[in-house]
Amino acid sequence: MDNNNNGGSSDDDEPSNEDDDAREPEQSSESQSQSELFNIRVAKARLQHAHDRAVLKRKPRYLPFKESRRWARAMWMQNEIDWEDWLNDGRRNPYVPSQPDVVYADSGFSTWHDFLNGPVKD
């Protein structure tokens, strides 16, 4: 009788599953780390989306009317057309509204001439 053919398989006949068994934990560890990375990316995207929505809901913060008028008077603009040209050139002070006549309607805005001209110090 041949001892190599006792119902078991020889190493040459069939590849061993030992290598596959050794790789399984590595693959599951790799897939687990990919899953964790995916979850982190999803959480980050959700946080970014929530932040963006919160920022868009915020009311703009402008200087008080008198300070905005002082800033505007220190600029070279003389009338509403100059103001609009300045805005259309892409320039803007984030603390002064682009439509001061609307924003400051109840805070003291009377005319463009008053807003843009006059002494810089009130």
Image (cartoon, rainbow, N blue to C red):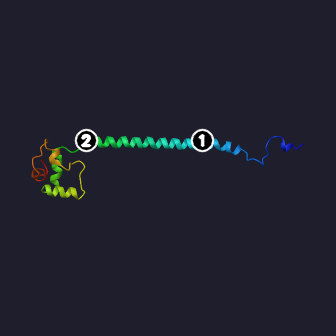
Left/right of residue 106 with respect to residue 25 in the rendered view:
left
The numbered dot on residue 59 is: 2
The numbered dot on residue 28 is: 1
Say if mark 2 contacts mark 1, CB within 8 Å.
no
Going by the numbered disc 1, the residue's amino acid type is Ser
Q: Earlier in the sequence, mark 2 or mark 1?
A: 1
Q: Nearer the viewer, residue 30 or 116?
A: 30
Q: Quick one: SS at disc 1?
A: helix
User: Where residue 103 appears, x then y in whole percent?
Assistant: 17, 45
Q: Quick one: SS at disc 2?
A: loop
Residue ID at (43%, 42%): 44
Q: Nearer the viewer, residue 83 or 19?
A: 19
Going by the numbered disc 2, the residue's amino acid type is Lys
Q: Which quarter of the figure has residue 104?
A: top left
Residue ID at (14%, 57%): 81
User: Where residue 99 appears, x then y in whole percent?
Assistant: 18, 49
